[in-house]
């Protein structure tokens, strides 16, 4: 969790801020799957690369709708010609059943 905050601080000093970004980042980890899904979709619409670590975490969420929203958001934020096929094929993003 500290790594995410450090990354957010570093990127925040470089990139211009967006209203509500921090709230959405926090909501992406909310205990309610509906709120997580909504936050992830909105993060994808904002298009701010600060959200990438949070979206990667949500791409392995236990709720299928949240996983799908995170993958969609990541495909918008990452360069489609290079990163998107790699993200879709990555074993890190496949949901593992316990």
Image: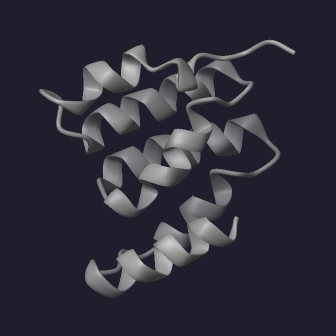
Q: Quadrant of the N terminus?
A: bottom right
Q: Position of residue 67 (x, y in %)?
A: 58, 26
- Which residue, as the protein is rendered here, is positioned at the far right? 98
Side of 57 relative to 85 (left or right)? right
Q: How is the image coloured?
A: one colour
Q: Position of residue 51 (x, y in %)?
A: 44, 56
- Vertical placement of 45 versus 87: above or below? below
Please name the residue shown 54% across and 77% down the image. 6
- Vertical placement of 18 versus 66: above or below? below
Q: Position of residue 62 (x, y in %)?
A: 74, 25
Judge by depth and name the residue closer to the eye, 6 or 41: 6
- Vertical placement of 44 versus 25: above or below? above
Which quarter of the figure has residue 23?
A: bottom right
Please name the residue shown 75% across and 51% down the image. 30
Please name the residue shown 41% across and 80% down the image. 10
- Vertical placement of 54 versus 4: above or below? above
Judge by depth and name the residue closer to the eye, 70 or 8: 8
Q: Position of residue 77 (x, y in %)?
A: 28, 44
Q: Quadrant of the C terminus?
A: top right
- Which residue, as the protein is rendered here, is positioned at the far left? 81
How many marks do you count on the picture? 0
Which quarter of the figure has residue 46?
A: bottom left
Judge by depth and name the residue closer to the eye, 91 or 70: 91
Which quarter of the figure has residue 38?
A: top right
Please name the residue shown 49% across and 30% down the image. 69
């Amino acid at each position: 969790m500290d790594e995410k905050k450090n990354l957010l601080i570093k990127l925040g000093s470089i990139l211009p801020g967006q209203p509500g970004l921090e709230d959405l980042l926090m909501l992406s980890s909310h205990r309610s799957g509906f709120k997580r899904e909504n936050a992830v979709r909105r993060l994808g619409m904002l298009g701010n690369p600060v959200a990438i670590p949070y979206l990667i975490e949500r791409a392995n969420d236990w709720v299928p709708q949240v996983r799908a929203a995170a993958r969609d958001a990541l495909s918008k934020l990452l360069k489609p010609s290079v990163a998107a096929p790699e993200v879709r094929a990555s074993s890190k993003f496949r949901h593992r059943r316990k």
